[in-house]
Amino acid sequence: MSLILIPPFVQQINSEIARQADVDLFVLRLDVMHPWVNGNKWFKLKYNLLEAEQKNFTRLLTFGGAYSNHIYATAAAGNLLGFQTIGVIRGEENLPLNPTLSFALQQGMELVYLSRQMYRQRSTVALNEYLQQRFGEVFIIPEGGNNLNGVRGCTEIISQAMPTPGYAYAFDYICVACGTATTLAGIALSLHQGQKAIAFPVLKGAFLKQEIENILTNYLASSLRTPYNSPAAWELMCDYHFGGYAKVNQQLLRFSQEFSSAHGVPLDYVYTAKMFYGVMDLLQQGFFAKGKSLLLVHTGGLQGNVGMEYRLQKMCQI
Ligand SMILES: *Cc1c(COP(=O)(O)O)cnc(C)c1O
């Protein structure tokens, strides 16, 4: 596979809040790796794409919502690496296509729409067999790249995506935004003893804890496990979802804009803005002990801002 990626870099954040808390703050910029294929979505795709290539598939099929970062990244990666791609999109077609789906189409992705009810069956054998029949030989990647290959890729976020080996282990806390927790699981599996992963769910609901245990158990029982994979401590911070998935309010929008302009780190509204907000709030509460250092993983997702800003504008016009 040949895809030229810029190595992520670590950026220090000189913030008054961090200084007052006596904590060092750094961001791991996975958003800079490639204009289209970046963030945690690249790490979740990596071993899925390698498996597809090894098994001589020429077509990929995957799932996502209409603003999905994963659909966007898969369409671009497929195009760059010579795979045909099919995107199974949740819900009806809405014309004109939003920026995410027009991009996917431009990259050559074939878009197929499933009713929300059908889409809910996306992980069932029945629906997958139906799609195999309808589209012929396709390598199916689950929504978000959320499978064991996805976890495997995410074990490389901290351990390998670093300027110098070992540098990653200087951090006490690794903070990450969390949807399905595939990324959190990969990160937790790659940390050293004494390091701790702090995850900020962007969805409401208390289902995640068990889900994370399940992902870790399945990974450790799989053939992908390496001797280095022992899950570090992790914790969920459940108070920063802002009402649920893709929900925002003025406070979050203002925070995101102010943080970006003060520190030169653009944030996406769905994931990273909520995590960064949560970290700054916890710093103000004195949650982190003095002298500790934090690494905030910028998981990308900036493509989604175009669609979000478009929706917000429409809301304001009403
Ligand atoms: C998908 C995504 C996440 C969530 O990843 P999970 O592995 O589902 O927890 C976080 N940040 C961004 C920018 C994403 O696109």
Image: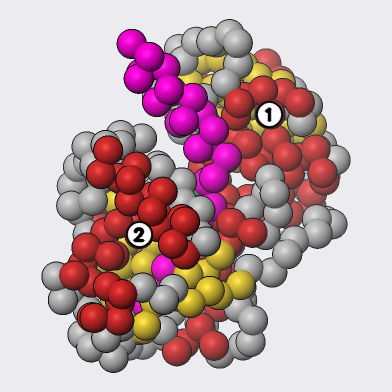
Q: Are marks 1 and 2 in contact (CB under 8 Å)?
A: no
Tell me the SS state at disc 1: helix
Q: Which residue is mark 2?
A: 276
Residue at left offset 37%, top offset 67% = 175
- Front residue of 130 and 72: 72
Quadrant location of the N terminus?
bottom right
> What span is colored magenta in the figure?
294-318
The percent position of residue 201, horizontal first and vertical second, equals 29, 51
Q: Amino acid at mark 1?
A: Ala
Could you say which quadrant of the image residue 15 lies in?
Answer: bottom left
Tell me the SS state at disc 2: helix
Count all numbered tags in the image, as a single digit: 2
- Front residue of 18 and 122: 18
The percent position of residue 155, horizontal first and vertical second, equals 52, 69
Residue at left offset 55%, top offset 10% = 93
* Cα distance between the residues tagged 1 and 2: 28 Å
Q: Is residue 282 above or below residue 230?
A: above
User: What number is the disc on residue 237?
Assistant: none
Quadrant location of the C terminus?
top left
Could you say which quadrant of the image residue 134 lies in?
Answer: top right
Q: Can I make out residue 142 in this image?
A: no
Q: Amino acid at mark 2?
A: Phe
Dot 2 surroundings within 10 Å: few (below 14), some, or many (20 or more)?
many
Could you say which quadrant of the image residue 46 lies in?
Answer: bottom right
Residue at left offset 27%, top offset 86% = 22
The percent position of residue 248, horizontal first and vertical second, equals 30, 36
Q: Which residue is mark 1?
A: 104
Residue at left offset 23%, top offset 51% = 240
Magenta stretch holds residue 300? yes
